[in-house]
Image: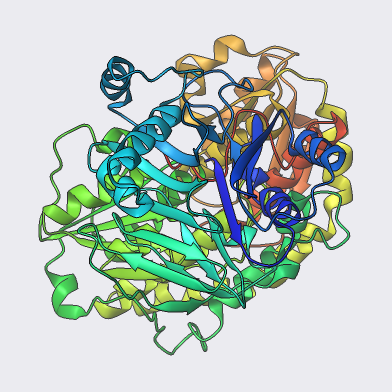
Amino acid sequence: MCGIVGYVGYQNAVDILLDGLKHLEYRGYDSSGIALMSNGEIKVYKALGKLQNLVDTMKKEKITSCNTGIGHIRWATHGLPTLANAHPHSCNCKGLTLVHNGIIENYQEIKETLIKNGAIFKSQTDTEVAAQLIAFEYGKTNDLVQAVSSAVSKLKGAWAFCVMHKNEPETIVATRKNAPLLIGAGENENFLSSDIAAIIKYTKKAIYLNDGQITKISKDKIQIFNEDLTPASNRMEILPFEAHSLSKMGYKHFMLKEIHEQPDVVRNILQDKIKDEISDIALNGVNLDINSLKKINRIQIIACGTSLHAGLVGKYVIEDLTGIPVSVEASSEYIYRRSIADENTLVIGISQSGETADTITAIKQVKEKGAHVLIITNRKESLLSRLSDSLFHINAGIEVSVAATKSYTAQLVSIYLLGIFIAQTLNMDKKRIQEIKHELLTLPSKLEAVLSGELTIKKLAKKYSGFKNFIFIARGINYPTALEGALKLKEISYINATGYPAGELKHGPIAMLDETMPVLAILNKGIVYDKVMSNCEEAYARQAKLIGVANEIDERHKELFDDFVIIPPVSDIVSPALNVTVLQLFAYFIAEYLGKDVDQPRNLAKSVTVE
């Protein structure tokens, strides 16, 4: 949610920190700040609003001699977005300064204890409590690693901390629990970050901290300690992304670039997994054989937001291909009820970042029940990946725009492949499997055909950009597509949009229909086509503006719909990948026409790392 970056080395720390924060800005951005260590003191600089405000502040300072610092970009949790609440936070004596991602659940009781010991608080945040607590513990030992260890043992919640103390120059101490944090290893310089995007420009060597571990870095040394402060030796990994993936490559926004990357993303996923329509697919990392799958009597899919919509499509696909009952639930709801997962349950957790807090909590719960956990994620180095029994890395590349596009399509394709894998392993309907394989192999070229028609969608978006409310309807496997289309429009244009199963229109939402309420209907030729058409006629009779998205057009469309978008011929089961691309473009062009901040919509963050 928030973003952290730290640097110790030979370069100007200001430049490194600001550049790192720029690549984390999609995670949260109501305030930002950096702390710099130089000549035995720590100076803190903060700014409200966009990161550019901090950049402008630092230009006036003209600092060139500092080579150690920490930075943070904040998405408000505790306290309003004010300078006092912005990170970094310091102790009363200013000797210790830190940045923090996550939420400390027991901060209030710790705060009361610290006040009794003379601490004076200037912010509303839980983070300042951590700064004061670590400083209090440092006073007992004069050792920053021991102080951090002692302090975090008293905390409850989730955190990633980067801490500096003026008595330990050119040194940063960091630790994490249920929040992402990694070390970037360089030559005579080392980095810390909550996301590889901040450091990929400088190094491709990364070391991931486990929960509870503490690291102490200087420009030429990295030390890692376990919770009991015994030395640890974590494996160094090579980061899978290139710096150019953080460039817009000529597109106006990252979102549009990432929408256009979808054909290649799908090709990359299919490569080496589907050779042809006849051969079995191979899913490296999915550790399920016929014996383990025969024991599975239910599948649970757990996810949040856009990933939840991918899971809903997955329910249709997996049940269609395998006959195994599948339930789909929001992680935030799953974790607060009794779990019925057991050793005969396959639990599929879906998360773009692999660091979604609610999903992490849910997966930990089902692992305790003995369920087999399969994670679908874009980050194979993430915490969810490390919790998995089986891993499906969607390999969509870095997605910068907050609104998920290419990662969603990659999740869809991954779920199709997983459904096929389970069905083929259990020797299910081979003809049906071959049909879907054929559809998947033709999907990249069909996505390109959809994208080639973006000018039509752009004109449509301009026409409907003045409406304040929108309804999306569909049935069957495209009902989740309606949900995702409505979510995209809400996220980036702030237009009130809602997705419904088309059959539910007459059970309440029809009361809202008039000439001010556009209805976008997804009606691919298939088993539910005629029923969706009937629902569209109901909307037409109430004078609603009607937009259709379908894989072919007939005479009824011309008199019923105000506007229409045709996608290439495609079977109903694979159609969500094409339909959602139309809706992504529609939402994008409306937001762009309205002048919204497409890549960084208000109040949203790319990776939600708090519950």
Q: Position of residue 149 (x, y in %)?
A: 28, 49
Q: Position of residue 203 (x, y in %)?
A: 63, 73
Q: Is residue 265 left or right of residue 163?
A: right
Q: Position of residue 22 (x, y in %)?
A: 72, 49
Is residue 63 positioned above or below 558 on the image? below
Closest to the observer, 307 or 141: 141
Q: What colouring method underlies this structural image?
A: rainbow
Q: Quadrant of the C terminus?
A: top left
Q: Quadrant of residue 495?
A: top right
- Residue 315 appears anywhere in the view: no
Q: Is residue 415 left or right of residue 365?
A: right
Q: Residue sitting at 63 percent across and 63 percent down?
A: 199
Is residue 394 positioned above or below 278 on the image? above
Is residue 276 positioned above or below 416 on the image? below
Q: Position of residue 294 (x, y in %)?
A: 14, 71
Closest to the observer, 544 or 112: 112
Q: Residue sitting at 81 percent across and 27 percent down?
A: 464
Is residue 26 positioned above or below 463 on the image? below
Q: Residue sitting at 48 percent across and 82 percent down?
A: 273
- Residue 514 appears anywhere in the view: yes
Q: Quadrant of residue 380?
A: bottom left
Q: Quadrant of residue 57?
A: top right
